[in-house]
Structure formats: structure tokens, C-alpha cells
Image (cartoon, rainbow, N blue to C red):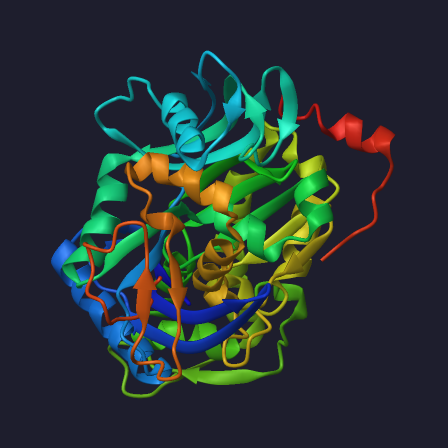
């Protein structure tokens, strides 16, 4: 049982789910209006923690469990991605490689002088090398005298990472795992083929829009434009001279991303500030306001992606985030980027909206992590607590956790423990493997 915590600009979402035999079953959801968050970054820890607490309480009531551990998503603002290598000597004589050895070689990979303003978020192993034999995914129980690990290190601004963790801790939670949001989304919403050949994920949120490139099953690039759905709402408010609340309702009830798909005949009233009588406008006029802002966002993201040759990747673009729910947005992006486009919508009952994709992907990512992934990531936190398991008894409100070190939590609690495509040919695959080398 795991819990995903998505701290967004517009809303804070908490999802409690069971992960059994590769099957994800959502048992509780909490959704609360955000506070203390601006452009995807926490600017007031007290307000944010209070909103997190409300969302958690709602999820606890629906799931009938007590939440303690959570998986928190970290935005890709100023994300730095760099390759790392670690090497350790197993011993003078060959012996079996243990879990401790895996943790040690991961720790060796992150021994470096990070700037004081940055903090490591994730460490992902690409392969292990035992006595010169590479391509190994799990070196445990193998025999060798020298162990190497090649992986990718993801770091972000310490302020962003610290504030997210601190707000969760202040709400009474233990941050079991922090994950760079695009990493979790790539593993969750993309098929194996899309991750392999290369795909762009565009997360269109309320406070910011993120473009991330997944290629060869790894996050290769991520950048953020500090504009999102809130900017669209403000545009509507200014142009139509109406309140922010009314503008948000208009966007949700009548908004189209593509003005060519909106009707000029369909009209609706708008309450105008300073006037006693509402003004009538058409769907098309509203869509033109929305489209103008979206095109500005897409132009900026396209300029950033152009430096990576990512727009030419076979997987095209996958849209997610609350703004991706606007009718006609896939057609607008397809025309702008001239590539295949689809909108990712969770298939879980009650969560069939793009805004829930991020919170759900956090749970899904944690559930898919192998024991080796957990050991490598634990080197970042400096403990082996991630390798712990959760057993759920008949009474879901009474959950015992079994971990390597159980001193840090009470005996009875619960978890806040928190697709396939055909190969397109080796020649094409080799061609695209050089895109980011």
C-alpha cells in the first residue's frame, strides 16, 4: 500500500492505492485547494502543510486507513541531470555481492561536491559491472572482486526540495520517497515502446508547464515554463472584465483550446464588473482568448525542446495535467508541433481526468520499483528504510510495517507507505539512440 502526494499550484492531491502483482487499485483519494504554492513551488510552508493535512484527512476517511508515509513529487524547476559512476572493491578474494555492496557502490557514485544551493533528489542505476562484465541489472549473489555502477543523478534547487519535504513533514507525514515528477510520469503513462524510442511529456498544470523528454527508458531532459492554467484564467478575467472565480468557471464550462472547434453561435452570459447586466459572448471568442495563451506557452516549450532534437522523436507528445482536459488541445498541439499527440487520462474510476495523472504516477512508480532500485535510492537518503515492506491485515486500519529499522515508526499504522509496442527495427533504434549522446 502506497500514498502519492502531488503538491500542485491549483490543488493538492493525495492518492492511496494497493499495488499487488503489478495491479494498481486505488482505495482512497483526497483533493484540496492549494495554498502557499506559486508556479509549482511552495512559498508558504505553513499554508501548504495545512492544505496537505486536509487532503490527507479526506483520503484517510475514504480509504479507512491511517496515512503515515508518502511519495512526494518534486517539480522539474532548474533540474540538473548528470551521469555518475561508482566503483568499489568487493575484497581481495572473490565473494558473493550483497545488498550492502549495492548500497556502497551507489553511495560511491554520489560522492561529489554539489553546490550548496542544490540537493540530490533521485539516483537511478542504468547498469552494474562485475569484474568487467557489463549490462547487469541485479548484481546480488554474483561473485566478483570489483563492482561498478553507472547511473543518472537528478538534483534540484535545495529550496524547492526542502520546502516540499518540510511541508509534508509539518503535516505529520514521513517522506518515504521524493521523485522528480517527469521520472514517475514516464514510467507510469508511457508504453515500453514510447519510453524506448523517445517521447515528449507535456505536463500542463495550473502554475507552470513542463516539457520532459523520455528516451531509452530514461529522463534525458526537462524544462519548465512558468505559465499554466492560472494564466489562462487571468487572461479571461482581464479581457472580459470579470472576476477570477467567474473566469475559471467559464474556462471549465465553455472553454476550448482550439478556436476552430468552438461555435460562434453558442453564446452564454458573463458577469462584468461595474455592470448590473451580464454581457453575452460566444464560445469562439472565449476560445480565442484561451488559444492565444496556449500558443505562447507552446512556442516557448518548442524553442527549448528544439535544442535537443526531441520534437522529431517517434513517440510524439503525450499531454497531461489539468489544462490537458480542454477540448481540442490535442489537435492544437498536433498542428503546432507537427507530430503525433495524445492526452493521458487515468483509467481508474473517479480519477478520469488528466489532473490526477501526476499523483497516480507517484504511486505507480513506487510500486514498480525493484529491490535494487530501492537499494540504490536509499543511498541518497543514507538509510535502508526504502527496502521495507508493508503487510495489510484483515482490518485495514491496523497495519504493521516490517522494515530493517523499525524504531522510527509505531508498530500499528498504515501506509502512507506511502503496454507494449512492436520494435520498429534495430536500424531505426540505433539511429535514435544517438540523439542525446
- The answer to whether any part of residue 289 appears in the image is no
Q: In what quadrant of the picture does the C terminus appear? A: top right
Picture quadrant where residue 368 is located: bottom right
Number of marks present in the image shown = 0
Farthest residue to the top: give it.
92
Looking at the picture, tell me which residue is in the foreground, 392 or 349: 392
Give the percent coordinates (x, y) of residue 395.
35, 84
- The answer to whether any part of residue 147 appears in the image is yes
Looking at the picture, tell me which residue is in the foreground, 144 or 200: 144
Give the percent coordinates (x, y) of residue 203.
50, 53
Q: Answer above or below: position of 369 versus 47.
A: above
Residue at 60 percent of width and 35 percent of height: 137
Left or right? Give the position of 396 relative to 333: left
Looking at the picture, tell me which residue is in the foreground, 175 or 256: 175
Give the percent coordinates (x, y) of residue 170.
14, 58
Looking at the picture, tell me which residue is in the foreground, 216 or 68: 68
Residue at 38 percent of width and 45 percent of height: 226
Q: Answer above or below: position of 180 versus 284.
A: above
Picture quadrant where residue 101 is located: top left
Q: Answer above or below: position of 381 versus 70.
A: above
Give the percent coordinates (x, y) of residue 429.
79, 32
Residue at 29 percent of width and 40 percent of height: 383
Residue at 48 percent of width and 55 percent of height: 204
Farthest residue to the left: give it.
46
Q: In what quadrant of the picture does the N terminus appear? A: bottom left
Amino acid at each position: 500500500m502506497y500514498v502519492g502526494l502531488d503538491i500542485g499550484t491549483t490543488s493538492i492531491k493525495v492518492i492511496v492505492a494497493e499495488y499487488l502483482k503489478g495491479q494498481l487499485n486505488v482505495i482512497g483519494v483526497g483533493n484540496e485547494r492549494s495554498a502557499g504554492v506559486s508556479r509549482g513551488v511552495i512559498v508558504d510552508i505553513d499554508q501548504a502543510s495545512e492544505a496537505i493535512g486536509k487532503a490527507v484527512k479526506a483520503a484517510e476517511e475514504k480509504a479507512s486507513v491511517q496515512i503515515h508515509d508518502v511519495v512526494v513529487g518534486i517539480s522539474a524547476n532548474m533540474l540538473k541531470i548528470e551521469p555518475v559512476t561508482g566503483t568499489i572493491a568487493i575484497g581481495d578474494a572473490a565473494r558473493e555481492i550483497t545488498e550492502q555492496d549495492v548500497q556502497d557502490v551507489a553511495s560511491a557514485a554520489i560522492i561529489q561536491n554539489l553546490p550548496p544551493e542544490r540537493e540530490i533528489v533521485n539516483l537511478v542505476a542504468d547498469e552494474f559491472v562485475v569484474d568487467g562484465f557489463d549490462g547487469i541489472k541485479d548484481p546480488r549473489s554474483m561473485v566478483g572482486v570489483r563492482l561498478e555502477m553507472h547511473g543518472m543523478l537528478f538534483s534540484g534547487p535545495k529550496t524547492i526540495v526542502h520546502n516540499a519535504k518540510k511541508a509534508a513533514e509539518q503535516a505529520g507525514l514521513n517522506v518515504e520517497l521524493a521523485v522528480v515528477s517527469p521520472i514517475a510520469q514516464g514510467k507510469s503513462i508511457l508504453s515500453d515502446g514510447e519510453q524506448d524510442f523517445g517521447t515528449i511529456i507535456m505536463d500542463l498544470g495550473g502554475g507552470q508547464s513542463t516539457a520532459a523528454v523520455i528516451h531509452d527508458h530514461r529522463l534525458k531532459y526537462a524544462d519548465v515554463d512558468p505559465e499554466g492554467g492560472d494564466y489562462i484564467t487571468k487572461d479571461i478575467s482581464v479581457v472580459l472584465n470579470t472576476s477570477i472565480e467567474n473566469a475559471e468557471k467559464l474556462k471549465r464550462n465553455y472553454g476550448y483550446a482550439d478556436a476552430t472547434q468552438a461555435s460562434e453561435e453558442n453564446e452564454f452570459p458573463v458577469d462584468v464588473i461595474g455592470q448590473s447586466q451580464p454581457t453575452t459572448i460566444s464560445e469562439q471568442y472565449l476560445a480565442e482568448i484561451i488559444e492565444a495563451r496556449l500558443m505562447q506557452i507552446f512556442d516557448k516549450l518548442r524553442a527549448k525542446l528544439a535544442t535537443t532534437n526531441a520534437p522529431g522523436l517517434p513517440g510524439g507528445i503525450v499531454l497531461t495535467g489539468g489544462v490537458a482536459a480542454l477540448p481540442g488541445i490535442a489537435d492544437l498541439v498536433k498542428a503546432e508541433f507537427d507530430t503525433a499527440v495524445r492526452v493521458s487520462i487515468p483509467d481508474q474510476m473517479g480519477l478520469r481526468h488528466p489532473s490526477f495523472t501526476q499523483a497516480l504516477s507517484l504511486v505507480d512508480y513506487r510500486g514498480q520499483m525493484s529491490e535494487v532500485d530501492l537499494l540504490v535510492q536509499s543511498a541518497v537518503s543514507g538509510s535502508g528504510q526504502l527496502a521495507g515492506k508493508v503487510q495489510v491485515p484483515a482490518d485495514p486500519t491496523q497495519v504493521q510495517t516490517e522494515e530493517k529499522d523499525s524504531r522510527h515508526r509505531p508498530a500499528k499504522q498504515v501506509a502512507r507507505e506511502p503496454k507494449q509496442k512492436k520494435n520498429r527495427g534495430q536500424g531505426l533504434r540505433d539511429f535514435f539512440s544517438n540523439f542525446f549522446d
